Amino acid sequence: MDLRFYHDGMRQDTYPEQLEGLNITYEDYEPEFGTPYGIARTSELLFWAHESTPGAEQMARQVEAVRTPPQLAAPPQQLIRAGVFGKLFSEPDRSTAAKAKIEDHLDFLFTYYKDQVEQRRWYGFWDYGDIMHSYDPSRHQWCYDVGGYAWDNSELSPDLWLWFAYMRSGRADVFRFAEAMTRHTGEVDVYHLGKWAGLGTRHGVQHYADSAKQQRIANTTYRRYYYFLTADERVGDLMHANVDSDETFLVLDPIRKIRTEPYTPDRNALSIGFGTDWSGLVSAWLTEWERRGPKWEKAKARVLSTMETIAAQPNGFVQGTGLYDLDTGKFAVADKPVVGVSHLSAMFGLVEMCAELIDQVDMPKFKEAWLDYCRYYNATKAEQKARYGSDFGSLLLFQGHSRQDAYAAAQTGDAELAARAWQQFYNSRDTWDYKESTDWSTKKVEGPTGLVPGSEAAWVSTNATALYGLAAIQNLALVGDKMP
């Protein structure tokens, strides 16, 4: 297949010109970065050995087994009792009108995306398992051809939404949907060969087109649920391959286009963020340690040393970034406090990984640093300034961050935080977050308005869906008894 990325450059020769283009198309272009070299696609073959040609009935059963392989599964009650994956989910509960309404919304969103796969013909050889990022109401079509609005590539963690939706419900259709996405995002959206091996590509028209090659897309967190539920060997290999992906920060600076101060990657002083960067790294290390993989002792040391040195920063997680030493596996402790908070930092698996780390590793200072971040993200600017010396600036994704309020409330018993979790969930300041006043219905698409007849929910965006789904599921589990 010819997978060359079609792009003539459009005179985007410098970083400022590329950033200008990003502001227009939402896809970040850079020469030579739109390459498919190193992406992967795995298929499975199943064989039956017969003494003679099987009959039609037996053949039909085998065809069905190929289409839908049998899957051994633990029921939700067992997963919840075991406290797996940070104790962040509970079974669906319709015991009150408010809870029933959230369950209805969660069912609506999953069903809508499942139906869109067929209606919009999303699944092809290289696309199988992914979903689209944004919808264009004027064309009654997903933005398959518009820059960074096209394929989602795990942006804001739809993978996690689907796995949590499955683990709390045990629904086979949710499992198959999540499985397909996990296989795709771990294979096609990530480089497995070449200088960017261990990095994934941000969302775009082609899965490999955007020039943001980052840890946040290759994030092992998106694979570990599937692996620990199935012991899938290929996904196990993908996760093991990420153990040394901290080395990629020597090759490529993920924020090279927006740095305001000179920076040259240094083996003993690599700039690595505590959010989207570290969450992917620590997930790979923790998984290797849990599995007792070939590098588990190194991985364990990396988990503990980075947890310790993040907690030791003057502002903990709020410090935002640190200088990492590849040889010692530690962050240098900064000599002065800095406020470096992004709305994206915690939304690529950091919430989920910190819950697991706190569950598994007895490190009070780390827990304290994480709970502080949880407390203050959705706090007022005055509260942030009183605690850290300055506020966090302009932020977004308050509904998605409501689950951090819920987590801190559950850990501390703070009733005000529990109330704030639900306030931010229901009344987020972000206009594109889902509200109770949202339409929560689909409209028919037919005739000249659509290439294929079907339905649309023009208000749906995958960013909002993923974060609404995760916030709803986790808030119900953590502070469901504190709902207004």
Image (spheres, rainbow, N blue to C red):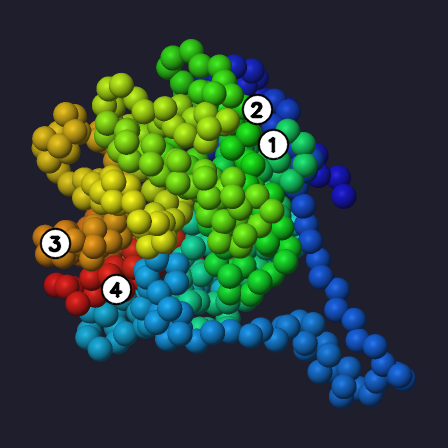
> Dot 1: what SS?
loop
In the image, farthest residue toward the top: 262
Name the amino acid type tagged 1.
Trp
Mark 4 vs 3, N-terminal side? 3
Q: Are marks 2 and 3 in contact (CB under 8 Å)?
A: no
Q: Position of residue 433 (x, y in %)?
A: 29, 50
Q: Position of residue 242 (x, y in %)?
A: 56, 42
Q: Which mark is residue 54?
A: none
Disc 1 marks which residue?
A: 196
> Dot 2: what SS?
helix
Mark 1 vs 4, N-terminal side? 1
In the image, farthest residue toward the right: 52
Choose between 388 and 324: the one closer to the eye: 324
| Crowd class of label 3 (few under 14; some 14 to 19; many from 20; radius 10 Å) | few
Disc 1 from disc 4: Cα separation: 39 Å
Q: In the figure, is residue 427 to the left or right of 294?
A: left
Q: Position of residue 298 (x, y in %)?
A: 52, 40
Name the amino acid type tagged 3.
Asp
Q: Residue at x 32, y 30 (%)?
A: 320
Name the amino acid type tagged 2.
Val
Count of residue discs = 4
Disc 3 marks which residue?
A: 414
Disc 3 from disc 1: Cα separation: 44 Å
Q: Which mark is residue 251?
A: 2
Figure check: 206 above or below 337: below
Mark 1 vs 2, N-terminal side? 1
